[in-house]
Image (cartoon, rainbow, N blue to C red):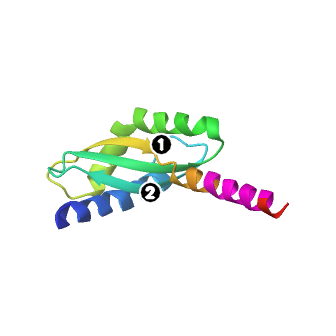
Amino acid sequence: MSIRTERVAAEIKQQTAVVLERELHFSLPAIVTVTDVKLSEDLKNAKIYVSVFHQEGEKTDIVKKLNFEKKQIKYVLSKKLYLKFMPEIVFYLDDTYDNAERLENLFRQIHKDESD
């Protein structure tokens, strides 16, 4: 990624976090954290990865709701970002923390089995 792409991605990440936390006209029944933004080289498409702290079954529903409301989110973001073109945004579930927790539990189980 170029330096400009990285800077724009970082700004989109920061402003998306603010918008999700404070400025939506609908409520989310969970804590949503923006973990990463992948921006295309031409700055036309942004993949926004979010981590959802809630029950497992509802995580995908929350990401679906974000994608359903992405026009409203994109509109609010366009007012905060000074870009010639606002990239198309798509939200994805970032399950890195869940995978790390699962691996940690497996390591604990192995360690417990070895000590017995």
> Was residue 109 drawn as part of the magenta stretch in this picture?
yes
Residue placed most toward the observer, 114 or 26 = 114
Q: What whole-number distance in Å separates the C-alpha atoms at marks 2 and 1?
A: 22 Å
SS for callout 2 = strand
Res 94 label: none
Q: Nearer the viewer, residue 78 or 87?
A: 87
Instruction: Look at the numbered discs 2 and 1 and tell me whether their residues touch, using CB distance below 8 Å.
Output: no
Spot occupied by residue 56 in the image (x, y as percentages of width and height): 63, 40
Amino acid type assigned to the residue bearing label 1 in the image = His
| Image depth: mark 2 or mark 1 in front | 2
Which residue bears the numbered disc 2? 35
Residue 61, by quadrant, is top right
Marks 2 and 1, the one that precedes in the sequence: 1
Which quadrant is the C terminus positioned in?
Answer: bottom right
Q: How many marks?
A: 2
Q: Check residue 107 for magenta coloring.
A: yes
**Is residue 55 found left or right of 73 in the rendered image?**
right
Image location (x, y in percent) of residue 79: 28, 53
Give left or right: position of 13 versus 60: left
Q: Tell me if mark 1 has few (under 14), some (14-19) or many (20+) residues whose alpha carbon lies within 10 angstroms of its own.
A: few
Question: According to the image, label 1 marks what residue?
Answer: 25
Residue for point 24% across, 65% down: 7
**Predominant secondary structure, magenta span:** helix
Query: In the rendered image of this protein, does residue 68 appear above or below residue 24?
Result: above
Few, some or many C-alpha atoms within 10 Å of disc 2 (few <14, some 14-19, many ≥20)? some
Q: Which residues are magenta?
A: 102-113
- Secondary structure under tag 1 reads loop
Q: Residue furthest right?
A: 116
**Residue 88: image x %, image y %?**
26, 41
Q: Could you tell me the amino acid type at mark 2?
A: Thr
Residue positioned 47% across, 42% down in the render? 25
